[in-house]
């Protein structure tokens, strides 16, 4: 067809599809918008323009877009190519947004679960860890744990203490056993009659209601990790809402030197009030066994205290930090250089619990001896043939009432004839 024929065959509304093309083009546009959003829309327009222009250039016919000439087709072709640039950028950003995010591993009962850590470059036995400065004590049991090295208030700020921690790679976490290495969860290590969980709940919650002097039944919790307000209620399905977080997760401690501690020191670490904080259950699950490099509380106002507790705990038990962890701790503490370190077993210890006096045991009431049995008088043996003049004689003989068949029964004694006389 000649150029004049092309111009005469097409209406002067270029780039407007003919009515027969609206349905397929519309379907393509809807599918692309639904699948890829605005980026998909731009991509579909670019493809339609490219194909329509290419058709007109090859056949010299107006095609679906009513292009009146090859000049129009060339312009549409160039425009479609240019349009692919922003369309490709939008589609690329959508692909990044849709990329799967690694989910946290399931929460374990120790309040910590795995998170990525640097590969171990040296075994933990390569460098001996400092031992506590306290006087050696006999081999501990779960109820008698030797105190760890204490950090006194004179130890200075958490930032200064951080500079003293060894920096090494993470040791392998293989062989980690929560109960086998750190003891049963929530035992009574301080001998106050309450397990560690209830000690920490009594320290961190307000408006408490107790069962006896230990078990927390209800209380109000202002969660420092998230800022959430939680009304705690003890129960099978509700206690999990407020959990006790190991600020230095036990598995992280295992990977950074706790393998070289004694069993008693590890039990002390797992129950040290400095290393324990009541927390929102979901936040504790998100933390898993992460260190400061991979997890921090969402409440930024609490991060300084949180890091100070981690630094103090690691210093007290001779643990090290990995490089990325040290850098993350330093970034936080540089925003609060005066944040003090905690004293292990001191500043973070639970507040004293009001002890309720034990009920006075009343002496048992004297046991009443049962009365001696009263001996019934032996029945008076009546002679076989006896008679009574009247009822008075029957009563005096102890035979009243007298019945038919009894010795001495006679009708004159039974005036009503019922068979029983002298009633």
Image (cartoon, rainbow, N blue to C red):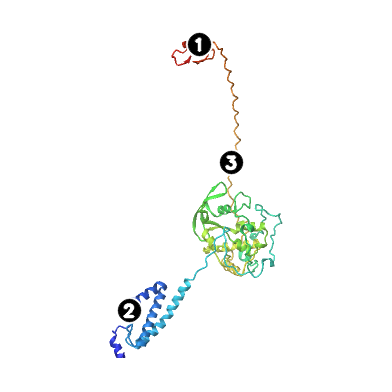
Expressed as whole percent of the image width and height from the top left, the position of residue 169 reads: 63, 69
In depth, the one of 256 and 394 nearer the eye is 394
Q: Quadrant of the N terminus?
A: bottom left
Q: Residue beneath label 3, please?
A: 359
Mark yes or no: residue 340 visible: no
Numbered disc 1: secondary structure: helix
Q: CA distance from mark 1 to mark 2?
A: 136 Å
Is residue 137 toward the left or the right of residue 330 in the image? right
Q: CA distance from mark 3 to mark 1?
A: 65 Å
Q: In the rendered image, which quarter is residue 368 located in?
A: top right
In depth, the one of 189 and 118 nearer the eye is 118
Expressed as whole percent of the image width and height from the top left, the position of residue 177 reads: 62, 60
Expressed as whole percent of the image width and height from the top left, the position of residue 56 reads: 35, 86
Is residue 217 toward the left or the right of residue 126 in the image? left
Numbered disc 2: secondary structure: helix
Binning the other alpha carbons within 10 Å of mark 3 as few (below 14), some (14 to 19) or many (20 upward) gives few
């Amino acid at each position: 067809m000649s150029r004049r024929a092309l111009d005469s065959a097409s209406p002067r509304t270029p780039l407007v599809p003919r009515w027969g093309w609206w349905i397929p083009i519309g379907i393509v546009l809807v599918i692309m918008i639904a699948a890829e959003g605005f980026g998909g829309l731009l991509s579909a327009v670019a493809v339609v323009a490219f194909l329509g222009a290419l058709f007109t250039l090859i056949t010299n016919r107006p095609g679906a877009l009513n292009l009146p000439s090859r000049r129009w087709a060339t312009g549409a072709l160039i425009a479609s190519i240019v349009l692919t640039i922003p369309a490709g950028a939008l589609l690329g950003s959508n692909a990044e947004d849709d990329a799967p995010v690694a989910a946290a591993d399931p929460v374990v009962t120790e309040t910590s679960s795995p998170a990525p850590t640097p590969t171990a470059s040296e075994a933990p036995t390569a460098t001996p860890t400092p031992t506590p400065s306290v006087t050696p004590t006999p081999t501990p049991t779960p109820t008698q744990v030797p105190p760890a090295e204490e950090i006194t208030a004179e130890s200075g700020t958490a930032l200064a203490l951080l500079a003293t921690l060894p920096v090494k790679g993470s040791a392998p976490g293989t062989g980690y056993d929560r109960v086998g290495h750190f003891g049963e969860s929530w035992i009574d290590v301080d001998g106050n009659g309450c397990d560690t969980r209830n000690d920490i709940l009594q320290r961190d919650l307000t408006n408490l209601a107790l069962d006896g002097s230990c078990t927390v039944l209800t209380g109000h919790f202002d969660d420092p990790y998230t800022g959430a307000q939680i009304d705690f209620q003890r129960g099978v399905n509700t206690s999990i809402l407020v959990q006790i977080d190991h600020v230095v997760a036990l598995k992280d401690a295992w990977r950074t030197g706790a393998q070289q501690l004694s069993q008693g020191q590890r039990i002390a670490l797992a129950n040290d009030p400095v290393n324990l904080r009541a927390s929102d259950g979901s936040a504790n699950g998100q933390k898993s066994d992460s260190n400061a490099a991979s997890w921090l509380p969402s409440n930024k106002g609490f991060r300084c205290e949180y890091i100070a507790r981690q630094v103090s705990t690691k210093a007290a038990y001779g643990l090290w930090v990995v490089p990325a962890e040290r850098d993350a701790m330093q970034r936080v503490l540089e925003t609060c250089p005066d944040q003090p370190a905690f004293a292990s077993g001191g500043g973070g210890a639970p507040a004293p619990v009001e002890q309720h006096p034990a009920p006075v045991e009343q002496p048992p009431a004297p046991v009443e001896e049962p009365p001696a049995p009263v001996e019934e008088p032996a029945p008076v043996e009546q002679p076989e043939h006896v008679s009574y003049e009247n009822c008075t004689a029957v009563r005096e003989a102890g035979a009243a009432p007298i019945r038919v068949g009894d010795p001495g029964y006679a009708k004159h004694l039974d005036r009503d004839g019922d068979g029983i006389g002298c009633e």
